[in-house]
Image (cartoon, grey):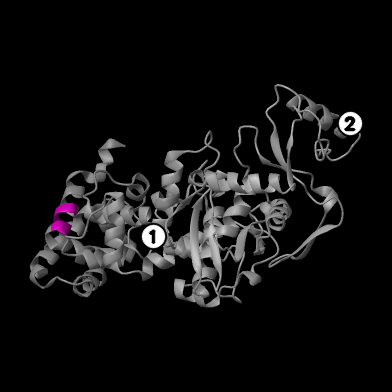
Amino acid sequence: MAVTRFAPSPTGYLHIGGLRTALYNYLWARKTDGEFRLRIEDTDTQRNNEDAMKAIINAFEWVGLDYDGKVEYQSQRMDIYKKYIKQLLDEGKAYYCYMSKEELDALREKQMANKETPRYDGRYRDFTGTPPEGVEPVVRIKAPLEGKITFVDGIKSMININCNEVDDFVIARSNGNPTYNFVVAIDDALMGMTDVIRGDDHLTNTAKQIIIYEALGFDIPKFFHVPMINNPQGKKLSKRDGAMDVMDYKKQGFLPEALLNFLVRLGWSNKDQEIFSMEEMLELFDPSNINKSASSYNQEKLLWLNAHYIKNVTNERLAKELEFFDCNISGHDKKEMILDLSKERAQTLVELKEAIEKITNRPESYDKKGVKKFIKENTAKFLDTYLKILEEKKDSLHLACDYEEVTRPFIEKFELKFPQLFQPIRISLTGGTQAPSVYDLMAILGYDEVNLRIRTALDKNFNKEAE
Protein backbone atom coordinates (compact mmCIF):
# COMPACT_ATOMS: atom_id res chain seq x y z
CA MET A 1 0.00 0.00 0.00
CA ALA A 2 1.68 3.19 -1.20
CA VAL A 3 1.16 6.57 0.43
CA THR A 4 2.11 9.31 -2.02
CA ARG A 5 1.69 13.02 -2.35
CA PHE A 6 1.87 15.95 -4.68
CA ALA A 7 3.35 19.04 -3.08
CA PRO A 8 3.38 22.12 -5.32
CA SER A 9 4.51 25.59 -4.31
CA PRO A 10 1.85 28.25 -5.04
CA THR A 11 4.40 30.68 -6.46
CA GLY A 12 3.20 30.04 -10.00
CA TYR A 13 0.49 28.17 -11.83
CA LEU A 14 0.46 24.40 -12.11
CA HIS A 15 2.12 23.39 -15.38
CA ILE A 16 2.05 20.05 -17.15
CA GLY A 17 5.32 18.81 -15.66
CA GLY A 18 3.76 19.18 -12.24
CA LEU A 19 0.53 17.58 -13.38
CA ARG A 20 2.45 14.58 -14.74
CA THR A 21 4.15 14.18 -11.35
CA ALA A 22 0.77 14.39 -9.63
CA LEU A 23 -0.67 11.80 -12.03
CA TYR A 24 2.14 9.32 -11.37
CA ASN A 25 1.68 9.69 -7.61
CA TYR A 26 -2.08 9.37 -7.95
CA LEU A 27 -1.90 6.22 -10.09
CA TRP A 28 0.55 4.46 -7.77
CA ALA A 29 -1.50 5.24 -4.65
CA ARG A 30 -4.79 4.20 -6.21
CA LYS A 31 -3.35 1.05 -7.78
CA THR A 32 -2.03 -0.15 -4.41
CA ASP A 33 -5.16 0.88 -2.46
CA GLY A 34 -3.05 3.44 -0.67
CA GLU A 35 -3.46 7.18 -0.14
CA PHE A 36 -2.80 10.16 -2.35
CA ARG A 37 -2.36 13.44 -0.50
CA LEU A 38 -2.20 17.05 -1.68
CA ARG A 39 0.09 19.40 0.23
CA ILE A 40 0.59 23.07 -0.61
CA GLU A 41 4.15 24.16 0.18
CA ASP A 42 3.42 27.79 0.98
CA THR A 43 6.10 28.69 3.51
CA ASP A 44 7.57 31.29 1.16
CA THR A 45 5.05 33.95 2.10
CA GLN A 46 6.66 36.64 -0.04
CA ARG A 47 6.31 34.61 -3.25
CA ASN A 48 2.98 32.89 -2.61
CA ASN A 49 0.19 33.73 -5.02
CA GLU A 50 -3.42 33.31 -3.89
CA ASP A 51 -4.68 32.93 -7.47
CA ALA A 52 -2.03 30.31 -8.22
CA MET A 53 -3.08 28.40 -5.11
CA LYS A 54 -6.69 28.34 -6.28
CA ALA A 55 -5.59 27.39 -9.80
CA ILE A 56 -3.81 24.29 -8.45
CA ILE A 57 -7.02 23.12 -6.75
CA ASN A 58 -9.08 23.95 -9.85
CA ALA A 59 -6.70 22.01 -12.07
CA PHE A 60 -7.05 18.93 -9.87
CA GLU A 61 -10.83 19.20 -10.03
CA TRP A 62 -10.79 19.61 -13.82
CA VAL A 63 -8.66 16.54 -14.53
CA GLY A 64 -10.40 14.48 -11.84
CA LEU A 65 -7.44 13.64 -9.61
CA ASP A 66 -9.14 13.21 -6.25
CA TYR A 67 -6.97 13.29 -3.15
CA ASP A 68 -7.44 11.80 0.30
CA GLY A 69 -8.13 13.89 3.37
CA LYS A 70 -7.92 17.64 3.48
CA VAL A 71 -5.41 19.79 1.63
CA GLU A 72 -2.44 20.36 3.91
CA TYR A 73 -0.85 23.83 4.00
CA GLN A 74 2.69 24.10 5.31
CA SER A 75 2.01 27.66 6.48
CA GLN A 76 -0.34 26.16 9.09
CA ARG A 77 2.30 23.74 10.42
CA MET A 78 4.99 26.16 11.63
CA ASP A 79 4.73 25.07 15.26
CA ILE A 80 5.50 21.49 14.20
CA TYR A 81 8.62 22.52 12.30
CA LYS A 82 9.91 24.70 15.11
CA LYS A 83 9.44 21.83 17.56
CA TYR A 84 11.75 19.60 15.51
CA ILE A 85 14.30 22.37 14.98
CA LYS A 86 14.45 22.78 18.76
CA GLN A 87 14.83 19.02 19.19
CA LEU A 88 17.83 18.94 16.85
CA LEU A 89 19.41 21.89 18.64
CA ASP A 90 18.83 20.30 22.04
CA GLU A 91 20.36 17.01 20.85
CA GLY A 92 23.41 18.74 19.42
CA LYS A 93 22.52 17.66 15.88
CA ALA A 94 22.04 21.25 14.74
CA TYR A 95 23.57 24.56 15.76
CA TYR A 96 23.29 28.31 15.45
CA CYS A 97 25.51 29.84 12.79
CA TYR A 98 26.39 33.52 13.21
CA MET A 99 28.15 33.96 9.90
CA SER A 100 27.13 37.25 8.30
CA LYS A 101 26.09 37.59 4.69
CA GLU A 102 29.31 39.51 4.00
CA GLU A 103 31.41 36.68 5.46
CA LEU A 104 29.51 34.09 3.48
CA ASP A 105 29.95 36.08 0.26
CA ALA A 106 33.67 36.50 0.91
CA LEU A 107 34.04 32.75 1.54
CA ARG A 108 32.18 31.94 -1.66
CA GLU A 109 34.34 34.32 -3.71
CA LYS A 110 37.54 32.83 -2.26
CA GLN A 111 36.41 29.28 -3.00
CA MET A 112 35.42 30.16 -6.55
CA ALA A 113 38.76 31.89 -7.10
CA ASN A 114 40.43 28.66 -6.01
CA LYS A 115 38.12 26.73 -8.36
CA GLU A 116 36.46 25.01 -5.42
CA THR A 117 32.76 24.23 -5.10
CA PRO A 118 31.22 26.97 -2.92
CA ARG A 119 30.13 25.50 0.41
CA TYR A 120 29.87 26.48 4.04
CA ASP A 121 33.11 25.74 5.89
CA GLY A 122 31.57 24.67 9.21
CA ARG A 123 33.19 27.44 11.25
CA TYR A 124 30.35 27.56 13.80
CA ARG A 125 29.75 23.79 13.92
CA ASP A 126 31.34 23.36 17.34
CA PHE A 127 31.31 27.00 18.42
CA THR A 128 31.18 27.54 22.19
CA GLY A 129 32.30 31.15 22.44
CA THR A 130 30.34 34.38 22.80
CA PRO A 131 28.06 35.00 19.82
CA PRO A 132 28.89 38.14 17.83
CA GLU A 133 26.55 41.05 18.42
CA GLY A 134 24.03 42.24 15.85
CA VAL A 135 23.83 38.96 13.92
CA GLU A 136 20.57 37.01 13.83
CA PRO A 137 21.78 33.42 13.48
CA VAL A 138 20.49 30.76 11.11
CA VAL A 139 20.23 27.14 12.22
CA ARG A 140 22.37 24.59 10.39
CA ILE A 141 22.16 20.82 10.67
CA LYS A 142 25.30 18.81 11.31
CA ALA A 143 25.80 16.87 8.09
CA PRO A 144 28.07 13.78 8.19
CA LEU A 145 31.68 14.72 7.50
CA GLU A 146 32.76 11.50 5.83
CA GLY A 147 31.39 8.50 4.02
CA LYS A 148 28.54 8.41 1.53
CA ILE A 149 24.83 9.04 1.51
CA THR A 150 23.37 6.06 -0.32
CA PHE A 151 19.84 5.28 -1.44
CA VAL A 152 18.15 3.20 -4.11
CA ASP A 153 16.16 5.29 -6.55
CA GLY A 154 13.23 3.43 -8.11
CA ILE A 155 14.10 4.79 -11.55
CA LYS A 156 17.83 5.56 -11.45
CA SER A 157 18.92 2.56 -9.30
CA MET A 158 21.70 3.03 -6.72
CA ILE A 159 22.65 6.63 -5.93
CA ASN A 160 25.83 7.42 -3.99
CA ILE A 161 26.63 10.97 -2.88
CA ASN A 162 29.89 11.73 -1.11
CA CYS A 163 29.34 13.48 2.19
CA ASN A 164 31.93 16.11 1.27
CA GLU A 165 29.46 17.29 -1.39
CA VAL A 166 26.88 18.21 1.26
CA ASP A 167 27.70 20.97 3.73
CA ASP A 168 25.97 21.87 6.99
CA PHE A 169 22.97 23.34 5.22
CA VAL A 170 20.52 25.81 6.75
CA ILE A 171 17.31 24.32 8.20
CA ALA A 172 15.98 27.58 9.68
CA ARG A 173 16.52 31.11 8.48
CA SER A 174 17.50 34.01 10.73
CA ASN A 175 13.83 34.97 11.11
CA GLY A 176 13.06 31.47 12.44
CA ASN A 177 11.30 30.23 9.33
CA PRO A 178 12.27 26.70 8.31
CA THR A 179 13.75 25.98 4.89
CA TYR A 180 12.33 23.91 2.06
CA ASN A 181 14.29 20.71 2.57
CA PHE A 182 13.55 20.67 6.28
CA VAL A 183 9.79 21.10 6.05
CA VAL A 184 9.51 18.60 3.18
CA ALA A 185 11.33 15.93 5.17
CA ILE A 186 9.23 16.60 8.28
CA ASP A 187 5.95 16.54 6.38
CA ASP A 188 6.74 13.44 4.36
CA ALA A 189 7.73 11.60 7.53
CA LEU A 190 4.79 12.70 9.67
CA MET A 191 2.28 12.14 6.87
CA GLY A 192 3.55 8.61 6.42
CA MET A 193 4.82 8.88 2.85
CA THR A 194 6.09 5.53 1.63
CA ASP A 195 6.92 6.60 -1.93
CA VAL A 196 8.07 10.02 -3.12
CA ILE A 197 7.70 10.41 -6.89
CA ARG A 198 9.04 13.75 -8.12
CA GLY A 199 11.12 15.41 -10.82
CA ASP A 200 14.80 14.60 -10.99
CA ASP A 201 15.60 18.27 -10.41
CA HIS A 202 15.04 17.29 -6.75
CA LEU A 203 17.75 14.66 -6.81
CA THR A 204 20.27 16.91 -5.02
CA ASN A 205 17.66 17.68 -2.35
CA THR A 206 17.23 14.01 -1.52
CA ALA A 207 20.63 13.67 0.16
CA LYS A 208 19.83 16.63 2.42
CA GLN A 209 16.41 15.24 3.29
CA ILE A 210 17.90 11.84 4.14
CA ILE A 211 20.25 13.62 6.58
CA ILE A 212 17.18 15.13 8.27
CA TYR A 213 15.34 11.79 8.34
CA GLU A 214 18.30 10.09 9.98
CA ALA A 215 18.90 12.89 12.48
CA LEU A 216 15.30 12.59 13.69
CA GLY A 217 15.07 8.80 13.48
CA PHE A 218 12.37 8.84 10.78
CA ASP A 219 11.80 6.05 8.27
CA ILE A 220 13.12 6.96 4.84
CA PRO A 221 10.61 6.60 1.97
CA LYS A 222 11.40 5.11 -1.42
CA PHE A 223 12.33 7.76 -3.99
CA PHE A 224 11.51 7.85 -7.70
CA HIS A 225 13.12 10.75 -9.54
CA VAL A 226 11.36 11.30 -12.86
CA PRO A 227 13.35 12.75 -15.80
CA MET A 228 12.25 16.11 -17.12
CA ILE A 229 10.00 16.87 -20.08
CA ASN A 230 12.00 18.61 -22.82
CA ASN A 231 10.87 20.46 -25.90
CA PRO A 232 11.17 18.72 -29.32
CA GLN A 233 14.72 20.09 -29.63
CA GLY A 234 15.77 18.46 -26.36
CA LYS A 235 15.94 21.71 -24.42
CA LYS A 236 14.06 22.90 -21.35
CA LEU A 237 10.34 23.14 -21.97
CA SER A 238 9.17 26.74 -22.32
CA LYS A 239 5.70 28.23 -22.26
CA ARG A 240 5.80 28.40 -26.05
CA ASP A 241 6.38 24.64 -26.14
CA GLY A 242 3.57 23.77 -23.77
CA ALA A 243 4.82 24.56 -20.24
CA MET A 244 1.82 26.72 -19.49
CA ASP A 245 -0.87 26.73 -16.83
CA VAL A 246 -2.80 23.45 -16.91
CA MET A 247 -6.06 25.41 -17.06
CA ASP A 248 -4.86 27.01 -20.31
CA TYR A 249 -5.22 23.56 -21.84
CA LYS A 250 -8.88 23.66 -20.89
CA LYS A 251 -9.22 27.10 -22.48
CA GLN A 252 -7.58 25.78 -25.66
CA GLY A 253 -10.19 23.03 -25.90
CA PHE A 254 -8.44 19.93 -24.59
CA LEU A 255 -10.34 17.22 -22.75
CA PRO A 256 -8.82 16.18 -19.39
CA GLU A 257 -8.72 12.50 -20.45
CA ALA A 258 -6.60 13.42 -23.46
CA LEU A 259 -4.19 15.50 -21.38
CA LEU A 260 -3.75 12.76 -18.77
CA ASN A 261 -3.30 10.11 -21.48
CA PHE A 262 -0.68 12.35 -23.11
CA LEU A 263 1.17 12.95 -19.85
CA VAL A 264 1.24 9.33 -18.70
CA ARG A 265 3.05 8.46 -21.94
CA LEU A 266 5.63 11.22 -21.43
CA GLY A 267 8.01 9.00 -19.54
CA TRP A 268 6.15 5.70 -19.19
CA SER A 269 4.90 3.13 -21.65
CA ASN A 270 3.25 -0.24 -22.04
CA LYS A 271 4.69 -1.73 -25.21
CA ASP A 272 3.31 0.24 -28.19
CA GLN A 273 -0.02 1.17 -26.62
CA GLU A 274 -0.95 4.84 -27.09
CA ILE A 275 -4.55 5.09 -25.84
CA PHE A 276 -5.08 4.51 -22.12
CA SER A 277 -8.29 4.80 -20.16
CA MET A 278 -7.93 5.69 -16.50
CA GLU A 279 -8.79 2.06 -15.68
CA GLU A 280 -5.92 0.85 -17.87
CA MET A 281 -3.50 3.34 -16.35
CA LEU A 282 -4.41 2.12 -12.88
CA GLU A 283 -4.00 -1.49 -13.92
CA LEU A 284 -0.69 -1.12 -15.75
CA PHE A 285 1.23 1.76 -14.16
CA ASP A 286 4.30 1.05 -12.05
CA PRO A 287 6.79 3.85 -11.25
CA SER A 288 9.66 1.38 -11.55
CA ASN A 289 8.93 1.30 -15.28
CA ILE A 290 9.32 5.05 -15.78
CA ASN A 291 11.91 5.84 -18.42
CA LYS A 292 15.39 6.79 -17.28
CA SER A 293 15.80 9.41 -20.00
CA ALA A 294 13.95 12.70 -20.56
CA SER A 295 10.79 12.84 -22.65
CA SER A 296 9.99 15.15 -25.56
CA TYR A 297 6.82 17.20 -25.67
CA ASN A 298 4.88 16.50 -28.87
CA GLN A 299 2.01 18.85 -29.65
CA GLU A 300 0.89 16.75 -32.64
CA LYS A 301 0.52 13.69 -30.41
CA LEU A 302 -1.56 15.68 -27.92
CA LEU A 303 -3.85 16.95 -30.69
CA TRP A 304 -4.18 13.42 -32.08
CA LEU A 305 -5.17 12.09 -28.68
CA ASN A 306 -7.61 14.92 -28.12
CA ALA A 307 -9.26 14.28 -31.48
CA HIS A 308 -9.61 10.62 -30.49
CA TYR A 309 -11.35 11.48 -27.24
CA ILE A 310 -13.61 14.07 -28.88
CA LYS A 311 -14.79 11.37 -31.29
CA ASN A 312 -15.32 8.81 -28.54
CA VAL A 313 -16.94 10.63 -25.62
CA THR A 314 -20.72 10.94 -25.64
CA ASN A 315 -22.44 13.76 -27.45
CA GLU A 316 -24.11 14.64 -24.17
CA ARG A 317 -20.66 15.18 -22.66
CA LEU A 318 -19.49 17.21 -25.66
CA ALA A 319 -22.54 19.46 -25.49
CA LYS A 320 -21.82 20.08 -21.81
CA GLU A 321 -18.12 20.79 -22.46
CA LEU A 322 -19.01 23.25 -25.22
CA GLU A 323 -20.95 25.42 -22.78
CA PHE A 324 -17.58 26.56 -21.38
CA PHE A 325 -16.92 28.09 -24.82
CA ASP A 326 -20.33 29.82 -24.98
CA CYS A 327 -21.60 27.28 -27.47
CA ASN A 328 -24.93 25.90 -26.30
CA ILE A 329 -26.61 23.38 -28.56
CA SER A 330 -28.21 21.21 -25.88
CA GLY A 331 -31.67 22.33 -26.95
CA HIS A 332 -31.09 22.01 -30.70
CA ASP A 333 -33.37 19.42 -32.29
CA LYS A 334 -30.51 18.24 -34.52
CA LYS A 335 -27.91 18.18 -31.72
CA GLU A 336 -26.85 14.59 -32.35
CA MET A 337 -26.46 15.07 -36.09
CA ILE A 338 -24.54 18.32 -35.65
CA LEU A 339 -22.10 16.80 -33.17
CA ASP A 340 -21.65 13.57 -35.14
CA LEU A 341 -20.77 15.59 -38.21
CA SER A 342 -18.63 18.28 -36.56
CA LYS A 343 -16.50 16.12 -34.29
CA GLU A 344 -15.05 14.05 -37.12
CA ARG A 345 -12.51 16.74 -38.01
CA ALA A 346 -12.13 18.61 -34.73
CA GLN A 347 -8.87 18.30 -32.81
CA THR A 348 -9.98 20.61 -30.00
CA LEU A 349 -13.25 21.78 -28.50
CA VAL A 350 -12.47 25.22 -29.92
CA GLU A 351 -12.33 23.71 -33.40
CA LEU A 352 -15.51 21.78 -32.64
CA LYS A 353 -17.26 24.99 -31.67
CA GLU A 354 -16.08 26.67 -34.88
CA ALA A 355 -17.30 23.72 -36.96
CA ILE A 356 -20.70 23.81 -35.25
CA GLU A 357 -21.06 27.55 -35.74
CA LYS A 358 -20.28 27.16 -39.45
CA ILE A 359 -23.35 24.96 -39.61
CA THR A 360 -25.70 26.76 -37.24
CA ASN A 361 -24.83 30.36 -38.20
CA ARG A 362 -25.71 31.80 -41.56
CA PRO A 363 -22.60 33.00 -43.38
CA GLU A 364 -22.09 36.75 -43.54
CA SER A 365 -19.46 36.54 -46.24
CA TYR A 366 -18.03 33.99 -48.64
CA ASP A 367 -14.48 32.73 -49.10
CA LYS A 368 -13.01 34.76 -51.97
CA LYS A 369 -10.67 32.06 -53.21
CA GLY A 370 -13.45 29.51 -53.18
CA VAL A 371 -15.80 31.85 -55.00
CA LYS A 372 -13.19 32.62 -57.65
CA LYS A 373 -12.47 28.93 -58.19
CA PHE A 374 -15.94 27.42 -58.09
CA ILE A 375 -18.53 30.10 -58.91
CA LYS A 376 -18.85 30.26 -62.70
CA GLU A 377 -21.26 31.96 -65.12
CA ASN A 378 -23.65 29.01 -65.18
CA THR A 379 -23.53 28.34 -61.40
CA ALA A 380 -26.54 30.48 -60.55
CA LYS A 381 -28.61 28.86 -63.26
CA PHE A 382 -28.10 25.25 -62.23
CA LEU A 383 -28.39 26.11 -58.51
CA ASP A 384 -31.76 27.71 -59.20
CA THR A 385 -32.85 24.59 -61.08
CA TYR A 386 -31.54 22.37 -58.28
CA LEU A 387 -33.51 24.30 -55.64
CA LYS A 388 -36.71 23.91 -57.62
CA ILE A 389 -36.18 20.13 -57.71
CA LEU A 390 -35.56 20.12 -53.95
CA GLU A 391 -38.75 22.11 -53.44
CA GLU A 392 -40.75 19.48 -55.29
CA LYS A 393 -39.36 16.76 -53.01
CA LYS A 394 -39.08 18.75 -49.78
CA ASP A 395 -41.68 16.74 -47.87
CA SER A 396 -39.56 13.61 -48.26
CA LEU A 397 -36.22 15.22 -47.44
CA HIS A 398 -35.18 14.25 -43.91
CA LEU A 399 -31.93 12.30 -43.97
CA ALA A 400 -28.65 12.70 -45.86
CA CYS A 401 -29.57 9.73 -48.05
CA ASP A 402 -32.80 11.50 -49.07
CA TYR A 403 -30.82 14.47 -50.40
CA GLU A 404 -28.40 12.12 -52.13
CA GLU A 405 -31.27 10.29 -53.84
CA VAL A 406 -32.49 13.56 -55.32
CA THR A 407 -29.06 15.00 -56.12
CA ARG A 408 -27.34 12.17 -58.00
CA PRO A 409 -29.85 12.09 -60.89
CA PHE A 410 -29.57 15.89 -61.13
CA ILE A 411 -25.76 15.68 -61.46
CA GLU A 412 -26.05 12.99 -64.13
CA LYS A 413 -28.74 14.82 -66.08
CA PHE A 414 -26.75 18.05 -66.32
CA GLU A 415 -23.43 16.23 -66.69
CA LEU A 416 -21.88 18.02 -63.77
CA LYS A 417 -18.79 17.02 -61.83
CA PHE A 418 -19.38 16.77 -58.10
CA PRO A 419 -17.31 19.86 -57.14
CA GLN A 420 -19.28 21.96 -59.67
CA LEU A 421 -22.39 21.50 -57.55
CA PHE A 422 -21.14 20.68 -54.07
CA GLN A 423 -18.61 23.47 -53.65
CA PRO A 424 -21.07 26.26 -54.56
CA ILE A 425 -23.54 24.66 -52.16
CA ARG A 426 -20.89 24.46 -49.40
CA ILE A 427 -19.95 28.09 -49.94
CA SER A 428 -23.62 29.07 -49.81
CA LEU A 429 -24.34 27.12 -46.65
CA THR A 430 -21.17 27.80 -44.64
CA GLY A 431 -19.22 30.54 -46.39
CA GLY A 432 -16.26 28.25 -47.07
CA THR A 433 -15.11 25.19 -48.99
CA GLN A 434 -13.89 22.97 -46.15
CA ALA A 435 -17.17 22.05 -44.52
CA PRO A 436 -18.21 18.39 -44.15
CA SER A 437 -20.50 16.34 -46.39
CA VAL A 438 -23.03 18.44 -48.28
CA TYR A 439 -25.71 15.78 -47.85
CA ASP A 440 -25.22 15.78 -44.07
CA LEU A 441 -25.25 19.56 -43.99
CA MET A 442 -28.52 19.76 -45.86
CA ALA A 443 -30.10 17.08 -43.67
CA ILE A 444 -29.18 19.07 -40.56
CA LEU A 445 -30.32 22.45 -41.91
CA GLY A 446 -33.49 21.21 -43.59
CA TYR A 447 -34.92 22.32 -46.92
CA ASP A 448 -36.16 25.75 -45.82
CA GLU A 449 -32.79 26.83 -44.41
CA VAL A 450 -30.88 25.33 -47.36
CA ASN A 451 -33.12 27.21 -49.77
CA LEU A 452 -32.73 30.45 -47.81
CA ARG A 453 -28.94 30.27 -47.63
CA ILE A 454 -28.45 29.39 -51.29
CA ARG A 455 -30.95 32.07 -52.43
CA THR A 456 -29.16 34.61 -50.20
CA ALA A 457 -25.79 33.70 -51.71
CA LEU A 458 -27.23 34.03 -55.21
CA ASP A 459 -28.85 37.38 -54.38
CA LYS A 460 -25.52 38.63 -53.07
CA ASN A 461 -23.79 37.12 -56.10
CA PHE A 462 -21.51 35.45 -53.52
CA ASN A 463 -20.29 38.99 -52.63
CA LYS A 464 -18.44 39.20 -55.93
CA GLU A 465 -19.33 42.88 -56.17
CA ALA A 466 -17.21 43.44 -53.03
CA GLU A 467 -14.04 42.23 -54.75
Query: Is 373 situated above or below 169?
Result: below
**Disc 1 versus disc 2: distance between alpha carbons?**
59 Å
Q: Is the C-beta separation of discs 1 and 2 under 8 Å?
A: no
Secondary structure at badge 1 equals loop
Magenta region: 449-453
Question: Which residue is denoted by mark 1 in the rendering?
Answer: 346
List the single residue furthest toward the right.
114
Q: Residue at x 42, y 51 (%)?
A: 57
Which mark identifies residue 430? none
Query: Is 378 situated above or below 240?
Result: below
Q: Residue at x 34, y 63 (%)?
A: 343
Magenta span: helix, strand or loop, mainly?
Answer: helix
Question: Magenta includes 450?
Answer: yes
Q: Quadrant of the N terminus?
A: bottom right
Instruction: Give percent across and percent down for residue 187.
Output: 57, 54
Question: Which residue is denoted by mark 2 in the rendering?
Answer: 113
In this rendering, would 215 be left or right of 14?
right
Query: Is 422 situated above or below 463?
Result: below
Nearest the viewer among 190 and 193 is 190
Q: Residues within 10 Å of mark 2 (few under 14, many from 20)?
A: few
In this rendering, would 177 be left or right of 453?
right
Q: Amino acid at mark 1?
A: Ala
Nearest the viewer among 271 and 179 is 179
